[in-house]
Image (cartoon, rainbow, N blue to C red):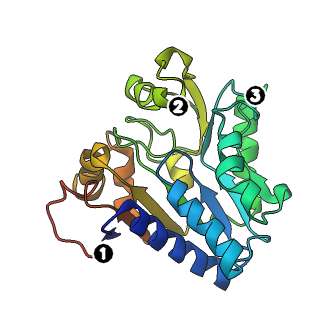
Amino acid sequence: MLVLIHDTYDAMSVAAAARLADQIRRKPTLTVGLATGSTPIGLYNELIRLHRFEGLDLSKLTTFNLDEYIGLPPHHPQSYHRFMREHLFDHINLDPRFTHVPNGMAQDVDAFCDWYEAEIERAGGLDVQVLGIGANGHIAFNEPGSSLGSRTRIKTLTEQTVADNARFFTDDPERVPRYAITMGIGTIMDARELLLLASGPSKAQAIHDAVEGPISARIPASIIQMHRKAFVYCDPTAASLLEHEYRG
């Protein structure tokens, strides 16, 4: 695991995007796991810039998103389908046939989760997985207490996650769905490389616990300490509680 601290959120995002872009240039058929939430937006903006102004070709990528709320149709303003279209897909040359976002409207959620796992395997597995981290240490919607070997499945969101995400639902926690489809921790750990991004003081404790604390289901993100090729990109506020020195 390598922790990289950059002076600003923008610098952190550009650095993470540069690493991902380098992987894409070396392997245009890369299979990439994507995250939603406010943190990866800077990375996606940089990928868009690289595509528009530096010719980065994304047409041969296959992508799999980490998660989606159950009960939100793809056109819902807060669905992750909509998020990905607005923040990335509509601005680059990805082939829609090779983009995958969990179906929150699936009639048989368990069968869909099995299918999603099979599709990832059929694509050759994830080459790179982009991750954010929740204030309670969750990755994707793998809440505290999740099995560290879990696969794609339905999860109940904790009250903290509901409260954290209420800002996307007119600050009304009652509007936030209580269930989601999420890749499992085992699925994430199978990726050949992890890029975890964190920004802001609200993520400082989670980053400390994930990077320097014991590996525990209490802090699901702590499992990245066991990954052979994990990169943690932080700004100074997210890294403010780290006890050891790390380079930028």
Q: Amino acid at mark 1?
A: Gly
Which is more foreground, mark 2 or mark 3?
2
| Percent x, y of residue 113 | 69, 39
Name the amino acid, label 3: Met
Cα–Cα span, label 1 and label 3: 42 Å
Q: Residue furthest left?
A: 243
Residue at 47 percent of width and 39 percent of height: 142
- Residue 105: which disc? 3
Q: Is residue 190 visible?
A: no
Which of the labelled discs sits on residue 168, or is there none?
A: 2
Tell me where residue 93 sits by quadrant.
bottom right
Q: Residue at x 17, y 71 (%)?
A: 245
Q: Is residue 206 above or below residue 136?
A: below
Q: Kindly report the distance in space between the C-alpha atoms of the residues bearing marks 2 and 3.
A: 20 Å
Image coords of residue 141 (percent x, y):
51, 38
* Dot 2: element: helix
Mark before the other along the chain sequence, 2 or 3 = 3
Q: Nearer the viewer, residue 205 or 150?
A: 205
Name the kind of residue labelled 2 in the image: Phe
Q: Earlier in the sequence, mark 2 or mark 1?
A: 2
Query: Mark 2 and 1 residues: CB-CB less than 8 Å, in contact?
Result: no
Residue 19 spot, x, y in % from top left: 51, 76
- Secondary structure beneath dot 3 equals loop
The residue under label 1 is 248
x and y percent of residue 165 in the render? 47, 31
